[in-house]
Amino acid sequence: MTQTTAESATRKQRAQIRVRTLRTDRWWLAPAFTFAGLLLFLIYGFWAIFDKTYFADPYIAPFTSPCLATSCPEGARFLGLAPFGDWYTLPPGILILGLPGGFRLTCYYYRKAYYRSFWLSPPACAVAEPHGRYTGETRLPLILQNIHRYFFYFAVIVGLILTYDAVLALVHKPAGLGTWILVVNAALILCYTFGCHSCRHITAGRLNHFSKHPLRYRWWTLVSRLNARHQQFAWASLFSVMIADLYVRLVAKGVINFPFA
Amino acid sequence: MGYKAKFRVWRGEGGEGRLEDFTVEVNEGEVVLDVIHRLQATQAPDLAVRWNCKAGKCGSCSMEINGKPRLGCMTRMSTFDEDETITVTPLRTFPVIKDLVTDVSFNYRKAREIPSFTPPADVKPGEYRMQQVDVERSQEFRKCIECFLCQNVCHVIRDHEENKPNFAGPRYLMRIAELDMHPYDVADRKELAQEVHGLGYCNITKCCTEVCPEHIKITDNALIPMKERVVDKKYDPLVWLGSKIFKRQR
Amino acid sequence: MERHEYDVVVIGAGGAGLRAAIEARQQGKRTAIVCKSLFGKAHTVMAEGGAAAAMGNVNPNDNWMVHFRDTMRGGKFLNNWRMAELHAKEAPDRVWELEAWGALFDRTKDGKISQRNFGGHEYPRLAHVGDRTGLELIRTLQQRVVALQQEDEKLHGDPEAYIKVFAECTITRLLKDGDAIAGAFGYWRETGDFIVFEAPAVVLATGGIGKSYVVTSNSWEYTGDGHALALLAGAKLINMEFIQFHPTGMVWPPSVRGILVTESVRGDGGVLRNSEGRRFMFDYIPDVFKDKYATTEEEADRWYTDQANNRRPPELLPRDEVARAINAEVKAGRGSPQGGVYLDVSTRLPAAEIIKRLPSMHHQFKELADVDITKEPMQVGPTCHYIMGGVEVDADTGAASVPGLFAAGEVSGGMHGSNRLGGNSLSDLLVFGRRAGAGAAAYVDSLTTRPKPTGIEEAKAEALAPLQRTGGENPYEVHHELQRTMNDLVGIIRKAEEMSEALQVIEKLKERAKNCASTGSRIYNPGWHLALDLRNMLLVSECVAKAALMREESRGGHTRDDFPTMSPEWRRKLLVCSATPDGTSITVEEKIQPSMRSDLIRLFERSELEKYLTEEELAEYDAAVKES
């Protein structure tokens, strides 16, 4: 083996193994679960956007928070605001869902998850992908994944609003189960949001001399610790936000009506 | 203690070949490479396999064991059932020379395309002062033993031979990250990473990290941070604007 | 047949080979690097502890003189003192240079290169990166070669114009023109095709001979190629009886038996215990080291935190002492179930600290032996690790006695005397790799005509022979028998009868090796490669056994059961091996070692020298002291 010697073409061939993979383990299990989990979330989200029972004072369903349309009930409005005016008649959730949605859509972890499970590129390591051509994130539309950090900034705002919602619930109805669900959800969302790879880059990842920026380095180490569990937080917060949202709607619908709900 | 294991080993030269069946003795505590060596010594003296240190430090004995890219010397036989047939094939992404030995020259060519460490001209040997926290990130990447398992598993080139000219592979994108994070490196590598070495091809599906025998977090610690650095340079309008204003002020 | 013309051909791409090639190229010579493995896979990656260099970053009292003294002491004063001097003086520059080429060593608080303690070194001296220093060194040199190639590409349009790597290529013969070196002959492992290098200078940097032993830390490449090539080309080997058995190799599972457990485990607090739980090293402190090592466990334990006021633990005695002690404990029936002793760090350091300081050891035991070293002790035993002997070279230039032949690193002899200190090999590679590269470049400059290689047809016939025989012996069988013989009969503890027996076996094996046959084609045929390597292993083993039989004393890496003490008379003598050109017979002769230069010998106390030198030499010492 040398580095550059031109070699005869006949020898320049990969081993001809015609099966797609020789893996003997259940490699399809992880992408299958991921596919099911994400699909469930999409279906639920689609339903939730058009569901109008999102407010059960003081709980507001996370999918609709902050509620900024005039159609929002008085108590549900974020800081009492309704900046959009009467012309806006679509469900209020549509106004804001793009932000956390975009954050998750461009998240480095979710990208891995859906590239593998939806696009099968690749479905699992050392399993051939079914596409003839591959250009990755080098061109439109996937090159847009690079704006992830802007979604991160907005996601921080949304995360803080959800925390504010949880705090409001704590202040108003401290003993309700819903309060704690909102608190746990807000905590998981924050852990997910601040464990983001872009956040890690912004705190100090872009620096080459940590030692000259001790405070930013401290943040970086904290973010790195969250980042190491980004996948776990991604899933935990995905389910917590669904559970919290569903819970509030069920309370609002009167389906859940036990004391301390 | 010992038992007879069923092995299927890919044998052939220059692409053409087939899986050959062997029954071979296995003793307690052995790894796959030991068994391949036993085959060599007893049944197939010309069975070609590349190996060297036998301790997971040199990265020579890369192969695919039951379809998974692994080091032969670090795959213990105790991880398999005794009645399991173990299939051993050469790395799929590179041309095969013979049996389990592949031509990995692709990697050495890519290594040469990456501009070397570029220290400032005025720092002399012996004058380098670096804090431990500043070198730790790059040190992690320098644990790399160049087994090329990440290069082999990466679907960008594994499944698409045509991408080879435009994609350096995880190992060398990590090398770029290593140098870019080096406290004394003054070269700007971001543009190069994206435009020449194909960082944009990476869709962070993390197979490189999964197969790394050194457990280097290639995706999380090298590739994604590098992608973020590229965003600074190329895709972030605010950072771009900020740097213009900042430059004018200076 | 493929032919190439170069100024300098470097055989071996480990630390010494790469450093030599870099130097030759930097001096403007067209340089080829030929290696049996892929580029960057050399055995140097196995070095764990560090590179010894008296930079004084951790303890400012350290300087080249202390390092020189430690090296001479470790080698039991048999070292080539000029080499030890150059080594101690130049090692810091060589380490700093690596940093400018991109190496990232661990740091001290003030940002300098951190240095760690190691057996036989008075001060913390080993520049390191965790426990993978060898990998860092090889990668840095590899990347330096690439950097030079990039320079050449800019200048000449061809990256390989001035330095080219011929990987997976084995050299089987050095070619000569009259008395002088004229090139080298070999084959591509990949295709089996032959290749001839025409070059006036050849640098041998092929490493060691461990594959002649069963239990060894060395990889398959260590078949003594450089030693044998030098012998066959008419050069001489010295100190071949001195083989270092590293005290701590893995003993379980059998497939990894011999693989190294770094000395840093002991440097960082690991202790050796026998099956009775006793820290037995306190029973094995030899007289010459009595005042330098702790005599109680309490003092030894204090040393880890306060090195100024306590003596070091006896676990950190030079390697030969520790290896013999472990050997003795096992023989006395106090060994572990698998025939080693226990090396325990789990009860000495918190788990997180172990993982931080010894990451690759943690990884190695976890993956290879299913042992978690943060929870349980390791089982360790001696393993053949390093040969102090090798090609006799000029200290300043690395030149062997054959014009145009140079050697550096493990394949050269003299620097380490009868025993090498841990950490001195990586610095040896750098210092003498550079010197050999420079020596070769200067030699090429001094020539007026270029030599023309002869003997190519003979070399070709020799290489093809095993493939042309049918029904001959399996080379693997011969190899196994050689390994068993060397391990059992010329191992750590040696006896005259056993060594004579070994020599008889080797004689028979030589005959059998001549009848080895290899099936299959020339394409990547390991059976054929082994058949060719056998010649080298047999030649080297014969040198080891013959020299060991002759040296009637025990010193460093040579322990005679029948001559258990050191003899000042023998200290003055080097044993020099040479061979007939066909390699059929080896002769070993005594040679008197030149006395140490007076300014160097005055670095030692008389009381210390008394343990090593003859009366006559001590008188010289006294005269030197008086004169100053």
Image (cartoon, coloured by chain):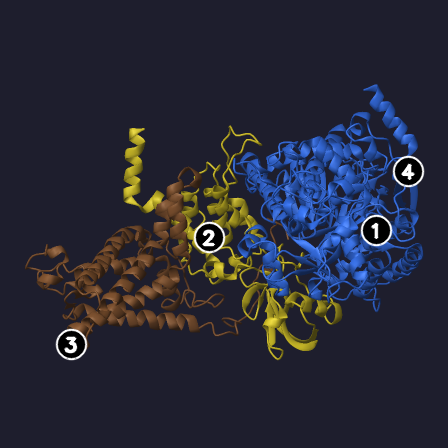
Chain colours: A brown, B yellow, C blue
Q: Which residue is mark 1?
A: C540
Q: Secondary structure at mark 3?
A: loop
- Please check whether the numbered discs 4 and 3 fall on a single chain: no
- Of residues B25 and C441, which is closer to you in this image? B25
Q: Which residue is mark 3?
A: A254
- The reply to whether residue C280 is in sight is yes
Describe residue A170's horizontal placement relative to residue A28 as left or right. left
Three-letter code for the amino acid on which mark 4 is drawn = Lys
Mark 1 closeness class: few <14, some 14–19, many ≥20 residues within 10 Å: many
- The reply to whether residue C415 is in sight is no
Q: Secondary structure at mark 2?
A: loop
Quadrant of the image for the C terminus of chain A? bottom left
Describe residue C21's horizontal placement relative to residue A17 as left or right. right
Q: Numbered disc 3: what chain? A: A
Three-letter code for the amino acid on which mark 1 is drawn = Val
Q: Secondary structure at mark 1?
A: helix
Please state which of the two labelled residues, at mark 2 or mark 1, is closer to the viewer. 1
Please state which of the two labelled residues, at mark 4 or mark 1, is closer to the viewer. 4
Please state which of the two labelled residues, at mark 1 or mark 3, is closer to the viewer. 3
Q: x and y percent of residue A175 in the render?
A: 22, 67
- Please check whether the numbered discs 4 and 1 fall on a single chain: yes
Residue B167: mark = 2
Proximity of marks 4 and 3: CB atoms separated by less than 8 Å: no
- Of residues A38 and B105, which is closer to you in this image? A38
Please state which of the two labelled residues, at mark 3 or mark 2, is closer to the viewer. 3
Q: Which residue is mark 4?
A: C591
Q: Numbered disc 1: what chain? A: C
Q: Earlier in the sequence, mark 4 or mark 1?
A: 1
Mark 4 closeness class: few <14, some 14–19, many ≥20 residues within 10 Å: few
Mark 2 closeness class: few <14, some 14–19, many ≥20 residues within 10 Å: many
Please state which of the two labelled residues, at mark 2 or mark 4, is closer to the viewer. 4
Residue sitting farthest toward the left: A86
